[in-house]
Image (cartoon, coloured by chain):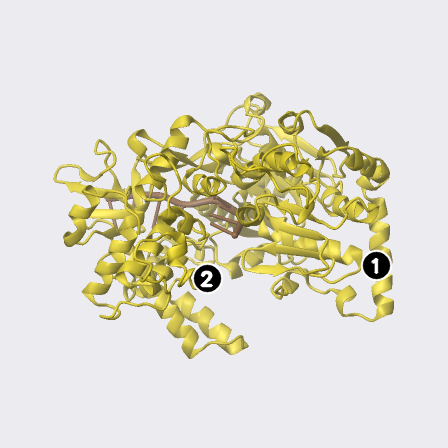
Amino acid sequence: MRRAGGNDAKEGKKPWKHGSNGKIQKVSEQLQEQRRNLPIAKGADALIREIKSNDTLVLLGETGSGKTTQVPQYILESGVLGSGMIAVTQPRRVAATSLAARVAAEQGCSVGDRVGYAVRFQEAYGPETKIKFLTDGMLARELLADPLLSKYSVIILDEAHERTLNTDLLMASLKGIQEARKGNTKVPHSGKGKERADNSSCGALKVIIMSATLDAEKFSRFFGNAKIIYVKGRQHPVKIYHTVTGQNDFVDAALRTFFQIHVDQPPGDVLIFLPGQEDIESLEKSISSYASQLPLGKSRVVVCPFYASMPQDKQNKVFSPTTNGQRKCILSTNIAETSITIPGVRYVIDTGVHKEKRHLAGVSGSGFNTLLVCAISKSSAMQRAGRAGREGPGFCYRLYPESAFRDLPDTSEPEIMRCSLASATLRLKCLQRDFFDLELLDKPDGSAINAGMKTLWMLGALDTEGNLTPTGRAMSLFPVEPQQSRALLESRIHGCTREVLAIVAIQSASSKVFYDPGSGSAADSNEPGSRDIERRDQAQAARAKFIHISGDHMTLLNVFRAYEDLLKSSGGDSKSAKAERRDWCNRHFLHERALTEALDIQTQLRRICDTMRGREASFGLSDPNIELDWRSSVAEGPGSTVEAEKVLKCLMTGLVQHGALRSAERGYCPIMDKSKTIKIHPSSTLAGKKFDAIMYDELLFTNSGSTYARCVSAIPTSIISDLSAYRPRST
DNA sequence: GAGCACTGC
């Protein structure tokens, strides 16, 4: 067990943890009082009766009902639990950790004792833990090691309406697990029905699906008409306005609406939902410029852009209180819709659009992604409006007519229908299941399922019959995309695991490494235009020293190495060391968050390599004498041509489907779909350059109408033939 | 020459 350290900063003071005994008692009484006043508290006894008499329940609770914090405690206090644990899943890490802190406080214990949590890189639970908050991805991983989830007596899937891929897959698995643990059927993961379950040991499993929207009936039907229980919420009323006609230019409409509010309405901050960075920056400029022309005496406007890929210290501006008479105007992407709550918001302006990423399987498995601006759903619109009513009555201005709202789909399409299925298929194959035999709330198209299978076959993870190979089994151990775990396994043959591991770690970090300055600092500049170009030139110059001629993958390796060197010279957690690292990242226009996350991932992957080392034979990997040792490094050393060639060779085994050849008249053509023409994304170090063949992490089709290859490397001439002649093989 | 919503293992 590992104790949490990182979460304390976010929670601020925790008197119940550090105070005297008397103080603990006092805080606890206040908390108990708050608990008793929650809307769900009135029905607690009835709820427990329902939980006792039903295996599965659907709990439909509005925001502010207290369902997530209270239901696990009711179950714990009612004694229905027995010797097992309660798992409560969340789509997001912050939710899991902060809920654990809250519930531990209400229970009067420390996080990690009776109440704990588990998210990637961070966990706090022990032998005493009865309530465990965890991300849905974490429970999905646990399922691979323990297909009956035998540690748990009750599993609560919270925020089920968000329909994340992992929540959907868990729901499908839980149905089978319940049957198996009752002893009625075979073990759910023996799809072919060979074995009988030895399942009486862990007892029955209760499942509670929690949702905030209209999906309750669908969940209920899925679980054989499970009982639905409704819980009232507690939200302040939000008055909603629609425009009379549709708006062509939502940025301009948002600008005008903001100033109407600013001039006519009483104090309160304004939150504007926009699709992406570009619109946010453009609106930021216009609002700042008009605000500076307002007559003196009118309250000043503080404009706060807010999107996930913004540096952390700039994000913090959103949470800092304004001085008297100022009005904050937050320009945000979807990040403020669910992930983060911003205090002080009284007015919401909803453009009605967002950016949506979608994977298209395409013909012949030539998958590519789209990132397009499109209309939101009704539940998104309601969620956005609700952001104005967190602290008091609020107002929501929708920049579309009421008729347009009525035409919106009820909910957005579940992730399972929009993403690549390769990774999920690999996990299912490890449980001897697949998408064809799995009962799901929504089933992806056959073409999407087949494309996922084909990818795994080309990587050598499945054989021609679709059965899991030893390579596939080994790949599944790594919490990264199959393309990357495949490259990692290949690296043992070329003796460059250290290098490939670093690249895989940085690739799978969630935030990007390079920071592209937009107009971020333009608001306080007199000549925004020239300032922008200057900053961009600075960024390019700072980046130049990392560039590797072969392209983005080796460039990422150089960045990662430089950061590792920096850590060696100024390691430690001292204030000055941290400041030095932050300064270094800022000077080089790098996101420190991406680099620290990559370090965490590197550590995690190394640990998995360590557990596999020497056990290659047990995975059936060919030539068990070649170990997967993360210390093995290219003998010729960093910067050598041999190094780049070996590393790129490994990466290419993962990117076999992501190669393109240059045609004289049309730019680059993907080998999987020669009818298509693609460009190298402008963010790439290879943008505008010409090579015979390239490989890339991803193809992205955007509103500009072009398809771009992102994260691109040139394929060394010596191995171009490997690409077209590729046959799946095992490592 | 031109651009990358949000999560998660």
- A33 and A622: which is toward the camera: A622
Q: Is residue A32 above or below residue A400?
A: below
User: Which chain is represented by yellow in the image?
Assistant: A
Q: Position of residue A685 (x, y in %)?
A: 27, 55
Q: Position of residue A71 (x, y in %)?
A: 76, 43
Q: Chain B colour?
A: brown
- A606 and A160: which is toward the camera: A606
Q: Which residue is mark 2?
A: A611
Question: Label 2's element?
Answer: helix
Please give left or right for residue A592 compared with residue A209 in the image: left
Q: Position of residue A425 (x, y in %)?
A: 44, 39
> Given the image, what chain letter belongs to the residue carrying mark 2?
A
How packed mark 2 is, by other alpha carbons closer than 10 Å (few <14, some 14-19, many 20 or more), is few
Instruction: Say which residue appears at 62% left-offset and 46% top-offset.
Output: A149
Amino acid type at mark 1: Ser
Question: Label 1's element?
Answer: helix
Asked where in the image residue A559 lies, by quadrant, the reply is bottom left
Mark 2 or 1 closer to N-term?
Answer: 1
Amino acid type at mark 2: Thr
Q: Which residue is mark 1?
A: A28
> Given the image, what chain letter belongs to the residue carrying mark 1?
A
